[in-house]
């Protein structure tokens, strides 16, 4: 039987952690070409993950004329009505200042008891094509927010996020392979692969 050929897309992300996680799960089934250096960062001003992922993917399609894959993702904390959500990257005031983002989150939750610290990571992919068509896929990972930072693996909010599907360690204390087995991003990757096969 002939092997199915890989889908080749330009990666919209400028975040090397995301890229590494995606490549580990796609394992070549989707080949990610590097984001061209000349493409300016898009202003992510949509009010939803899918809206921002579409903005990012479409800007790459416009600049390259090729299909592009964008991931917009973030953390939704129930007691904060879903915040930081689409503001996850700059919740602490800076731009992608992970330490400041985590510090603000701990501050907002200072008086919140364990059972009310439920949260989830969400990833939404938009694969946009030059003909205007697109494929959307999503993945979530349920968990809760710890009281202190633990571990130095991963990125962003990982040292504070304790996934429900594991043993009480934060994502910061999971190896890359362990995180990829249960993460929102890997679930979104599998959903995207399934949608492309359908
Ligand atoms: P691109 O837009 O270039 O893809 P980005 O880092 O700006 O990269 P987002 O706009 O989607 O990505 O912001 C996502 C933020 O949410 C990110 O900066 C982290 O703070 C957080 N985040 C997303 N996925 C995460 C994960 O797997 N672990 C920890 N934090 C995560």
Image (tube, rainbow, N blue to C red):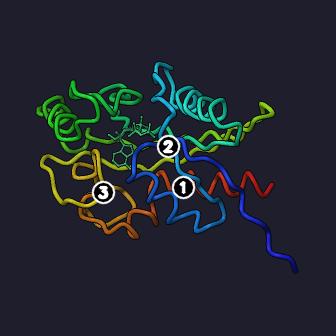
- Ranked by sequence position, the earlier of labels 2 and 1 is 2
Q: Do the residues labelled 1 and 3 touch (CB within 8 Å)?
A: no
Q: Which residue lies furthest to the right in this view?
A: 1
Vertical order, 73 against 79 (above or below): below
Q: How far from the left and from the top, in percent, is residue 119?
A: 35, 41
Q: Which residue is drawn at 80% across and 75% down?
A: 3
Q: Residue beneath label 3, please? A: 154
Relative depth, front residue between 195 and 45:
45
Q: In this view, does 133 lie to the left or right of 100?
A: right
Vertical order, 44 against 22 (above or below): above
- Ranked by sequence position, the earlier of labels 2 and 3 is 2
Q: How far from the left and from the top, in percent, is residue 113?
A: 17, 39
**SS for dot 2:** strand
Q: Residue at x 59, y 29 (%)?
A: 59
- Name the disc covering residue 123, or none: 2
- Name the disc covering residue 187, or none: 1
């Amino acid at each position: 039987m002939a092997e199915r050929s890989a889908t080749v897309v330009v990666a919209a992300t400028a975040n090397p952690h995301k890229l590494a996680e995606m490549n580990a799960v796609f394992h070549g089934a989707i080949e990610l070409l590097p984001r061209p250096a000349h493409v300016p960062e898009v202003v992510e001003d949509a009010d939803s993950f899918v809206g921002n992922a579409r903005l990012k993917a479409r800007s790459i399609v416009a600049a390259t004329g090729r299909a592009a894959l964008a991931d917009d993702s973030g953390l939704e904390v129930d007691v904060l009505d879903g915040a930081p959500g689409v503001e996850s990257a700059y919740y602490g005031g800076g731009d992608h200042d992970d330490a400041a983002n985590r510090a603000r989150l701990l501050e907002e939750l200072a008086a919140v008891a364990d059972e009310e610290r439920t949260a989830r990571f969400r990833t939404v992919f938009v694969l946009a094509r030059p003909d205007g068509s697109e494929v959307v896929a999503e993945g979530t990972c349920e968990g809760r927010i710890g009281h202190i930072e633990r571990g130095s693996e991963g990125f962003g909010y990982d040292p504070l996020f304790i996934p429900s599907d594991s043993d009480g360690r934060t994502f910061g204390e999971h190896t890359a392979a362990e995180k990829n087995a249960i993460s929102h991003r890997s679930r979104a990757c599998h959903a995207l692969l399934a949608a492309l096969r359908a």
